[in-house]
């Protein structure tokens, strides 16, 4: 009996896992040279536009209660957004040398204006904090907002120059004059009683020290001094102690502590559900929730757009923060690294403090949600800072190579009334050039 000949076993092709395929595509798109550029530009634009919509919705009742047109605050915010867009475009096109040259003039101007706030007859008090200057009519400016931008630019330029001279390994060069100047700005801010802006400025200072590679003991020392000063300022103020007592509050008034704003912010978020009650259909903005279009605009967003709307806002800020970290981590220019890290720390810390206060996880600090809340004084320097990030993202070698070979999709030149055939797009050439620019850290 003859045995049957066995056929050789051929290996089966590996199973094509759709999850792995999707992960590979996402990873490929994530590692493209212009990812950070598009994330910063698109994310900031979406946050600003959505913020304009929510400012219009949240401020209508407040404006009518003040006998003003319903679109009053929206029109002012729209004007500030238009000016801020011009600042963003200007900052995104400036060379890095010009940004460094502007550091000292911006710092000097911010210090002058912050000192001018304390002059009687010039400074204006709003909600108990004297940190505004009246410009005439209904327009006011808050110089402390420009102090954040000044500290980022000046601190980044200072640390970059000391790194070039190899001085950062000495603790006195690490701290002086960065920490004294930052404490001077903090003192001018605290003279007006603005604890929230002082916290953001402290976060920027710690971010710069961390990026500069400050030793742990030095970092902890500065943090301890700032913490003790902050604790003393909180203990000596009944208003700040009351804000701490409102953490986790469930009743608007508990004894002598008034937690009306904190509790009604939670009510607004709780009544929104998954998809919200609809744009413009908020109940809390009808006089129940104070500062509905400024500090607590995130609560109105949760009520009208629901959990989906608030998660979208969080996702946009997370993308913006990731892009800023990516720009800071992939550059070889020390100034770009420190400035990008400072701006990212500023925007991320302010967003966390604002949203944490609305959620009842942090004390109410009175800081707006960046690019989202009403307030031209906060919007203008923030949009200029976004322009900085865009300029830094464009300056990466791989991004420059990708932008230089990118062909326009529309408006091709015509020859004799017909569109000339230029052949297939040279995407492979762009990839080769982008991959060849290894100094940016692209994989």
Image: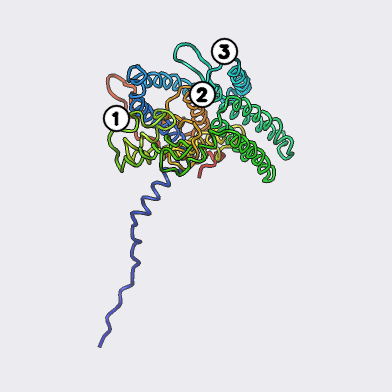
Give above or below for 247 relative to 413. Answer: below
First reached walking from the N terminus: tag 1 or tag 2: 2
- Report the Cα–Cα distance between label 3 and label 1: 39 Å
- Corner quadrant of residue 59: top left
Pointer 1: what residue? 280
In what quadrant of the picture does the N terminus appear? bottom left
- Corner quadrant of residue 108: top right
Residue 46 falls left or right of residue 201: left
Return the mark for residue 121. 3
Say which of marks 3 and 2 sits in front: 3
The residue drawn where x is 55% and y is 40% is 329
* Nearest the eye: 284 or 370: 284
- Report the Cα–Cα distance between label 3 and label 2: 34 Å
* Nearest the eye: 155 or 11: 155
First reached walking from the N terminus: tag 3 or tag 1: 3
Q: Point out residue 385 in the picture as x, y percentages from the top left corner.
A: 51, 28
The residue drawn where x is 34% and y is 25% is 56
Say which of marks 1 and 2 sits in front: 1
Q: Secondary structure at mark 3?
A: loop
Q: Point out residue 176 in the picture as x, y percentages from the top left corner.
A: 71, 32
The residue drawn where x is 66% and y is 44% is 220
* Nearest the eye: 347 or 12: 347
Pointer 2: what residue? 91
Q: Point out residue 395 in the picture as x, y percentages from the top left corner.
A: 53, 31
The residue drawn where x is 49% and y is 31% is 366
Q: Point out residue 255 in the picture as x, y percentages from the top left corner.
A: 46, 39
């Amino acid at each position: 009996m003859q045995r049957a000949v066995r056929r050789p076993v051929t290996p089966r092709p590996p199973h094509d896992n759709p999850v792995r395929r999707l992960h590979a595509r996402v990873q490929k798109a994530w590692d493209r040279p212009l990812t950070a550029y598009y994330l910063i530009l698109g994310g900031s634009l979406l946050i600003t536009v959505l913020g304009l919509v929510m400012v219009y919705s949240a401020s209508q009742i407040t404006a009518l209660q003040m006998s003003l047109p319903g679109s009053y605050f929206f029109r002012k915010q729209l004007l500030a957004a238009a000016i801020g867009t011009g600042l963003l475009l200007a900052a995104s096109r400036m060379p890095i040398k010009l940004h460094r040259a502007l550091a000292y003039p911006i710092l000097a101007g911010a210090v002058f204006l912050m000192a001018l706030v304390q002059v009687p007859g010039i400074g204006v008090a709003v909600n108990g904090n004297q940190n505004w200057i009246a410009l005439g009519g209904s327009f006011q400016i808050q110089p402390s907002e420009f102090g954040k931008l000044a500290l980022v630019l000046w601190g980044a330029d200072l640390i970059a120059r000391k790194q070039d001279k190899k001085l950062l390994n000495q603790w006195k060069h690490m701290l002086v004059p960065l920490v004294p100047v930052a404490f001077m700005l903090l003192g001018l801010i605290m003279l007006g009683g603005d604890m929230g802006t002082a916290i953001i400025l402290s976060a920027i200072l710690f971010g710069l020290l961390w990026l500069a590679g400050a030793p742990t003991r030095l970092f902890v020392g500065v943090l301890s001094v700032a913490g003790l000063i902050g604790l003393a300022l909180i203990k000596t103020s009944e208003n700040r102690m009351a804000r701490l007592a409102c953490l986790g509050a469930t009743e608007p008034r508990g004894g002598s502590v008034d937690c009306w704003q904190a509790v009604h912010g939670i009510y607004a978020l709780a009544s929104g559900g998954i998809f919200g009650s609809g744009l413009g259909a908020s109940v809390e903005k009808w006089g129940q929730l104070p500062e509905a279009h400024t500090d607590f605009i995130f609560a109105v967003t949760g009520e009208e757009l629901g959990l989906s709307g608030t998660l979208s806002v969080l996702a946009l800020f997370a993308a913006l923060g990731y892009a800023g970290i990516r720009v800071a981590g992939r550059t070889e220019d020390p100034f770009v690294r420190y400035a990008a890290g400072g701006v990212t720390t500023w925007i991320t810390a302010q967003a966390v403090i604002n949203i944490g206060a609305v959620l009842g996880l942090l004390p109410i600090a009175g800081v707006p949600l960046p690019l989202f809340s009403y307030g031209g004084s906060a919007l203008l320097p923030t949009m200029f800072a976004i322009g900085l990030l865009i300029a830094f993202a464009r300056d990466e070698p791989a991004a420059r190579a990708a932008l230089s070979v990118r062909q326009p999709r529309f408006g091709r030149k015509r020859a004799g009334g017909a569109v000339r055939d230029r052949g297939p797009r040279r995407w492979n050439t762009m990839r080769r050039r982008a991959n060849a620019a290894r100094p940016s850290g692209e994989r």
